[in-house]
Amino acid sequence: ISPTSRVSLSADTLLDLLSGKTDVTTAALIGKLEVRGEPMGSVLLGGIIDGFRRMTDAGGVRGRVARGFSRWLEQGARR
């Protein structure tokens, strides 16, 4: 089965999305995120990003891991 949507973005844009520096809508509007086919691809990506960001507020091990990963992204995962 072939995909009905394809989302294209750079690694830097993905890092910006995960770290909260930008959001899916803004990235799409300024041309850093391209959706071909069914536009639900960007909605799905937005849900994944939002889920990750919510995990940074969670308690326990999951929250600790998400916060650590988020800090790593903010501190320069682009090196």
Image (cartoon, rainbow, N blue to C red):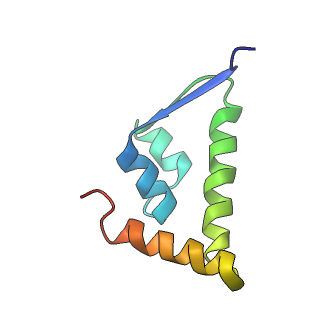
Q: Position of residue 1 (x, y in %)?
A: 75, 14
Residue 33 can be seen in this image: yes
68 horizontally vs 3: left or right: left
Residue situated furthest right in the rendering:
1
Is 11 in front, or is 30? 11
Q: Is residue 67 left or right of residue 32?
A: right
Q: Residue furthest left?
A: 79
Q: Position of residue 13 (x, y in %)?
A: 40, 48
Measuring from the top left, give residue 4's x and y in whole percent.
Answer: 70, 20
Q: In this rendering, would 50 be left or right of 74?
A: right
Q: Answer yes or no: is residue 57 visible.
A: no
Residue at (35, 49) in percent of width and height:
12
Task: Tell me what residue is drawn at x 33 percent, y 61 percent.
Answer: 77
State which quadrant residue 9 falls in: top left
For the C terminus, give its image quadrant. bottom left
Name the outermost residue toward the bottom: 59
Residue at horizontal 42 percent and vertical 57 percent from the top = 16
**Is residue 2 depicted above or below 50 in this figure?**
above
- Give the residue drawn at x 32%, y 72%: 75
Outermost residue on the front side: it is 61
53, 31: nearer the viewer: 53
Count of numbered circles in the view: 0
Up/down of 60 relative to 7, above or below: below
Q: Which of 71 and 31 lies nearest the eye of the viewer?
A: 71
**Dividing the picture into quarters, in which one does residue 64 lie?**
bottom right
Tell me which corner region of the image, top left, top right, bottom left or bottom right, holds residue 50: bottom right
Note whether 27 is above or below 18 in the view shown: above
